[in-house]
Image: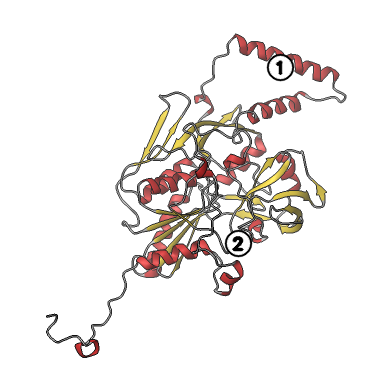
Amino acid sequence: MANNLLPSLALVSALAFVPAASAALAPVDVDSYRELDQFMTVLDQVKANYVDRVDDTTLIRGAIDGMLASLDPHSSYMDAREYRNLMTTTDGNYGGLGLTVTMDDGAVKVMAATRGTPADRAGIKAGDFITHINGQLFYGGTLDEAVDRMRGNPGTTVRITIVRPGRERPFDVTITRAIIDIPAVTSSVRDGVGILTVNTFSRVTTEGTQHAIADIRRQLGHEPAGWVLDLRSNPGGLLDQAVSLSDLFLDNGEIVSQRGRRPTDIERYYAHPGDATNGAPIIVLVDAGTASAAEIVAGALQDHRRALVMGERSFGKGSVQTLIPLGDGTTALRLTTARYYTPSGRSVQEGGIAPDVPVPQLSDPDYRTRTAVRETDLRRHLVNEAGIRDDVLQSDDRPDPRFVSTADQLRERHVEDYQLDYAVRTLARLAPQPARPAQTAAATGAPRGGRH
């Protein structure tokens, strides 16, 4: 069932689901009891002396939120409403504007605008700050409060004020709310190349990709010259779908491993025989909005040299969240329980997936000045245990002679998406060229009978 809420999560993560009964409880030692006693003392003082009467529910919820917020950006407590929102989002259908947002020092920051949604059509970009909602300043509140102000019935409008790095002045955008029904996968054909656009890792992503591959073959009547797997602005989703999607393109080998706190807490996932594309060349497109489950796929195909990764460095979220239902199953704890690693043993935490061929999005007129938002920009993000080299995180500002066209020049050539256009042209060049008719000896001037 869809609702009219924006997702209140900082980023949809690689999620693993476990029953509440299987969640092991950590033993409580003497120091823990001492700290709990201190907590109860503070609770009693607040209830007895705070200027306004405060109920226990508000205080305990605030304590839980504060405890989880002290861990990392992706651990959180979900009440009944937030739990329902997550369930509908993983099913690929929810209500709102199509924005993924987080809080950054009291301000609402856009992480991604899902393609094809009202927010995307209105031109909202990753890195934008939302300062006003319907003309009212929003600063210092909670993410849920911002979501509540932006939600509403489909067909109604909301006016938000955007501050965009690189722009001198804020500007207003009016967006019409809608039911967001995200197709997990869409497909198209261009110049003999099959394009698979994976928007989210919901329960039907792998199945949808299989259908899309079959549809493209039917359209062409033969195998395409190659495949573009477009994972840009894909914030992730279900871990099992990331594994099964990778398995579609791999014949064997490890896809990903996840490693928990203890050295023995290692789980590995492997590919099964069979490549759905029969070994055809693949280009994976990534950008700063490619995160979590999407990075698992890009990293697996890159490490196995099964695909060429193209675009911009990805988000860099290399952690797995376990969803632990609480109580009667209407609330849940979303807790970071493991880091994931690519087949070569790389952790993408902080550093992300670096493209084999960096290609800027020249068709975006703001790409040179717009600040990309990545995991390293989130407060209390997990640190990569292996360390990250500075040259991985820093941009190379030297001009590349291949990428000098402006957005206006590309528009005149009817190029609306430069990264996709570059990938398609690259694959099209790999296609077998039709044989040229043999030239006569008289036309070429060569002596009859061959070379002498």
Q: Is residue 328 left or right of residue 385?
A: right
Residue 323 locus on image (x, y percent)? 55, 33
Residue shown at 69% from the left, 41% from the top = 104
Mark 1: few/some/many CA within 10 Å (<14, 14-19, 20+): few
- The part of the image, by quadrant, that contains residue 147 is top right
Q: Amino acid at mark 1?
A: Phe
Q: Residues within 10 Å of mark 2 (few under 14, many from 20)?
A: some
Nearest the eye: 347 or 279: 347
Task: Name the spot of residue 148 as percent of width and height, x first.
Answer: 74, 44
Color scheme of the displayed model: secondary structure
How far apart marks 2 and 1 lie (CA) works out to 51 Å
Q: Which secondary structure lies at badge 1?
A: helix
* Closer to us: 221 or 113: 113
Q: Is residue 237 visible?
A: no
Amino acid carrying label 2: it is: Asp
Residue where numbered disc 1 is placed: 39
Q: Is residue 342 left or right of residue 369?
A: left
Residue 411 screen position, x and y as percent? 58, 71
Q: Is residue 48 above or below residue 276?
A: above
Q: Kindly identify which numbered label has been placed on residue 364.
A: 2
